[in-house]
Image: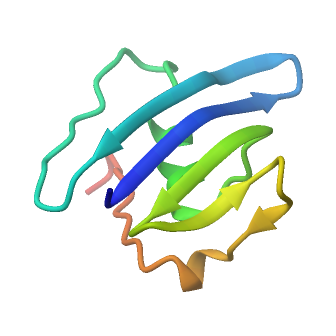
Amino acid sequence: MELKVDGVTKLFGSVTALYEVSFEAERGEFVTVLGPSGSGKTSLLRCIAGVETPNAGTIEIGGKVVFSKRDGIEIPPEQRSVGMVYQSYAL
């Protein structure tokens, strides 16, 4: 499994941005995250990249656990080999 997200939850104060999100993606597979504004798409990508810390769940990249709340694992973004391009309407 190239990417595995299991039970990822992200809270911002009393706002739940992500609730127990789980999915898997194989190498070479394209995955699209769709949803309206405010549905948690960017929060999910930021959690995978490591620039946002989930409140619960596990994230594996390339078979390596890069985040696990339960096991106290949090690999920093620069060690995850994940690229992220921010969307900007000003471009």
Where 84 falls versus 20 (above or below)? below
Where 6 falls versus 71 (above or below)? above
Number of disc labels? 0
Quadrant where the N terminus lies?
A: bottom left
Q: Residue at x 30, y 32 (%)?
A: 33
Quadrant where the C terminus lies?
A: bottom left
Residue situated furthest bottom in the rendering: 79
Looking at the picture, how far across and down is residue 76, in whole percent? 68, 76
Q: Is residue 7 left or right of residue 39?
A: right
Where 3 falls versus 78 (above or below)? above
Q: Is residue 7 left or right of residue 71?
A: left
Looking at the picture, how far across and down is residue 34, in whole percent? 28, 24
Q: Residue at x 67, y 59 (%)?
A: 67
Looking at the picture, how far across and down is residue 61, in whole percent? 44, 64
Q: Nearer the viewer, residue 85 or 10?
A: 10
Q: Nearer the viewer, residue 20 or 43?
A: 20
The part of the image, by quadrant, that contains residue 74 is bottom right
Q: Residue at x 42, y 80 (%)?
A: 81
